[in-house]
Amino acid sequence: MTSADESLARAEELLARLEAARARLEATDDPERAIEVLQELADLAKAVEAELESARQGGEAETGAAPDAPDA
């Protein structure tokens, strides 16, 4: 498995955790708990973004593409 594949797999796991947290948010009526879950959602979203960026960079490194090369 390539580093890009590993990053994508981690991102998929994080997305599943994000979905579970979203469901907890919808299910709660406690404002304090909602704030906690919102913070968790924000943290998970940042982690997903980081993994996707890592996967993008890994994919570019494996194909030898320049990071900001325009599509032909």
Image (spheres, rainbow, N blue to C red):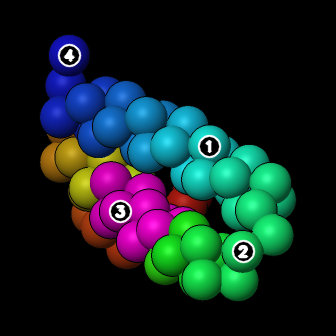
Instruction: Specify start and end residues of the magenta stretch as a single range.
Output: 40-51
Q: Earlier in the sequence, mark 2 or mark 3?
A: 2
**CA distance separating discs 1 and 2:** 17 Å
Q: Quadrant of residue 38?
A: bottom right
Q: Which residue is mark 2?
A: 30
Which numbered marker is on residue 1? 4
Q: Amino acid at mark 2?
A: Asp
Which sits in the foreground, 41 or 37?
37
Q: Nearer the viewer, mark 1 or mark 2?
A: 2
Q: x, y (%) of residue 4? A: 27, 37
Q: Nearer the viewer, mark 2 or mark 4?
A: 2
- Count neighbours of disc 3 (C-alpha within 10 A) and say few if under 14, some if 14 to 19, many if 20 or more: some
Q: Is residue 41 magenta?
A: yes
The answer to whether residue 59 is seen in the rendering is: no
Dot 1 and dot 2 residues touching (CB under 8 Å): no
Q: Is residue 35 magenta?
A: no
Q: In percent of the image, x 43 and y 34: which residue is there?
A: 13
**CA distance separating discs 2 and 4:** 43 Å
Which numbered marker is on residue 47? 3
Q: Amino acid at mark 1?
A: Ala
Q: In percent of the image, x 72 and y 74: which residue is there?
A: 30
Q: Which residue is mark 1?
A: 20
